[in-house]
Image (tube, coloured by chain):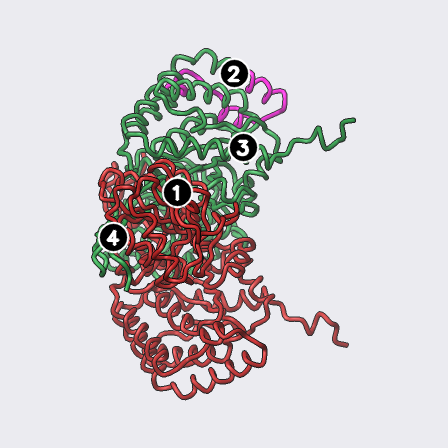
Chain colours: A green, B red
Amino acid sequence: MASVQDTQIDFDAMVADLARAGRAAQRQLARLPSETKAAALRAAAGAIRANGAGIFAANVRDIAAGEANGLTGALLDRLRLDPARLESIAAAIENVAALPDPVGEVIGTSIAPAGMELIRRRIPIGLIAIIYESRPNVTADAAALCLRSGNAALLRGGSEAVNSNRAIHAAFAEGLAQAGVPAEAVQLMPTQDRAAVGAMLRAAGLIDMIVPRGGKGLVARVQADARVPVLAHLDGICHTYIHHAADPAMARAIALNAKMRRTGICGAMETLLIDAAFPVAGALLGDLIEAGCELRGDARARAIDPRIGPASANDWDTEYLDAVLSVAVVDGLDAALDHIARHSSGHTDAIVTRDESIAARFLDEVDSAIVMHNASSQFADGGEFGLGAEIGIATGRLHARGPVALEGLTTYKWQVRGHGETRP
Amino acid sequence: MASVQDTQIDFDAMVADLARAGRAAQRQLARLPSETKAAALRAAAGAIRANGAGIFAANVRDIAAGEANGLTGALLDRLRLDPARLESIAAAIENVAALPDPVGEVIGTSIAPAGMELIRRRIPIGLIAIIYESRPNVTADAAALCLRSGNAALLRGGSEAVNSNRAIHAAFAEGLAQAGVPAEAVQLMPTQDRAAVGAMLRAAGLIDMIVPRGGKGLVARVQADARVPVLAHLDGICHTYIHHAADPAMARAIALNAKMRRTGICGAMETLLIDAAFPVAGALLGDLIEAGCELRGDARARAIDPRIGPASANDWDTEYLDAVLSVAVVDGLDAALDHIARHSSGHTDAIVTRDESIAARFLDEVDSAIVMHNASSQFADGGEFGLGAEIGIATGRLHARGPVALEGLTTYKWQVRGHGETRP
């Protein structure tokens, strides 16, 4: 007589089994020569190109299901694969294959007082879980970054992309097999049940790190519930402070770019702090309004341009991810620093000024993962930082901050070479 | 009419208030010149010496209470302060004052593809909580390490040392005041209520990191309940593998030292793996038995010396912290690696061999925070590693591993210096 219990799935046991398999594969991965890992990635890129027809067919099923389920046009667009997007997925894998392998790098050497040689050497972290939403390219991107850095990956993509993710994962696995890399090095969760995500979040000691990739709801849930360390950012409430000594043309170009180039990315400016003594504030704000941005300002900002609406207290803590900007007029650097200390999410904050000593104070005193002088906050990105790729941007204070790529996917061990030393 | 609620303490609010005060002080601390922080530490050491009489009087009250409460002799010994111990507390603070300041160090520079200069610079982590047990010296040690690295400290010592800790903290605070460092840079929890510890563990976003210092019960509770990142090690199940090509005299000296120098420290050997082909296994095991160590072995070990008792399955996963050792005979490196992979706590594992290629494989393939060749695992210590001190030893995989000192109490930020770059 089967009980209800018998038909329920034990997701903790499922995650434990997947994690043990992933960890076993990772121990092999950790010892592979760099070139073998690179060859596996190139083979995976080739297999994704070779399996294009099957991947598109799977994607068509996801798109049809998404339309039937009433997904918005923006979500359908994120989900959709076409030949150009598939080629960019394959090329991104090849790009990661070409990045320098961080594993084995010596990050410090010294001699212990008792005489042993101490070597700190980079090693992979272990098993990394990536929990993501609708973009199927994350399946390949995250797998490639984990593999290049010697980590096993446990992927859990969004339900709306389930067929696309399975097809991409299957092609990726073909490439690994061609290079002799164990299949369990990159695993896709075999269920879309949300309870399985809960089991992943609880898997301390089995999963070494979780990277959530997606909207604020997903990241907030992972941060609130995870018993495993999480690498993430929740908000990108990025400030740009236009100091009174800013070059006027540069300030206008940076402000417009920081807000309007792409409004939906985490590095987009959400609050503009404009110095009361900056001479062309009206022109700068006018640029933004004329580019289609809604401005919400304090009383002093509204006095500059009547087209600026009132900002509520919430606006200073809001990540719009849209063509909306909060604007405050401040009296000098200290007022700007104070506003940023109270409202920044610790992601990216920027100053525009020709005054080097003011810039130096801003770069030293603003406590965010990324601080910028005379540049657009839209550069907050691993590719733009020359890292070749990124697994995400972190605003936590430990381990890795800002754009995280291969180095942030490693840890280190101490290797001690002695000559028979015993401790007195 | 006062309700019961009115008389209860809101520990979350208490911790939030302390954390906000600590964070405000830390923002000042982060900007202090290195020499000011060093001067404050030297002044704190001087104040501890000057207040010796008061500190001893407080300690006498703790000892009397401990005796009345039936504390064991070992615990009373940990608690007891005498002139030599007080001097070593003061000297340790001066030692930390003399260590190089990690704050501001540039750990990487590069040029972004778009032309900005990228600088990764060490910064303090923020507010660090230390939760510890009976040794009152931790009050001064932890405060000194946090202050030197620009972090604020929130200290919560054991109830049995409450008077000693308050007296040491008060003296330390005198030193800070002399150097103009805000008092809230080093705070001692004003209550010994255990519920206050729960509030500290929940204080994500207010406390940046927690370091538990004490027995396994304390560390396990902190690791299980904390919503704040924890830097710690739970167990030190350290292995020493005597390879068949080990120098016999070196192997005997290292095995004896690794187990018997001090049996109660986390770097003490708990399991000896002895190669079946090692020629002087009997003599090596005899040394340990004759030094007073109880050996618990597998059948092959027991066949070497009848004085060896039987090991149960639990022994391989037990940190004795005593003159007890589990012993297994293994057939070669792979068997040793397999045993260590299954039973090591990831703290410190060592090999003794003259074969460099075998040693290299051991150092690469054992996945512990510290791996050693031809040295005693008792060297697993920040002082012995030349770090000058340690806040603790970490066996987690992220942020910092092995002995953690000033560098492990820092994080970094990206400073971006542009020339007006906007993102295309």
Q: What residue sits right under mark 3 in the picture?
A: A17
Describe the element under mark 2 as helix, strand or loop: helix
**Image location of residue A323, percent across then percent down:** 47, 39
Q: Label 2 vs label 4: CA separation?
A: 63 Å
The answer to whether the residue labelled 2 contacts the one labelled 1, judged by CB atoms less than 8 Å apart, is no
**Tag 3 and tag 4 share a subunit:** no
Most common SS among magenta residues = helix
The answer to whether the residue labelled 3 contacts the one labelled 1, judged by CB atoms less than 8 Å apart, is no
| Observer-nearest of B332 and B144 | B332
Describe the element under mark 4 as helix, strand or loop: helix
Q: What residue sits right under mark 1 in the picture?
A: B329
Q: In which quarter of the image is residue A203?
A: top right
| Observer-nearest of B200 and B402 | B402
Kind of residue at badge 4: Met
The C terminus of chain A sits in image quarter: bottom left
Kind of residue at badge 1: Val
The answer to whether the residue labelled 2 contacts the one labelled 4, judged by CB atoms less than 8 Å apart, is no
Q: Residues within 10 Å of mark 2 (few under 14, many from 20)?
A: many
Residue drawn at the location 38% of the way across and 15% of the way down: A49
**Image location of residue B24, percent across then percent down:** 43, 67
Q: Which of marks 3 and 1 is in front?
A: 1
Q: Is residue A140 above or below residue A117?
A: above
Describe the element under mark 1 as helix, strand or loop: strand
Q: Magenta segment range?
A: A61-87
Is residue A81 rendered magenta in the image? yes
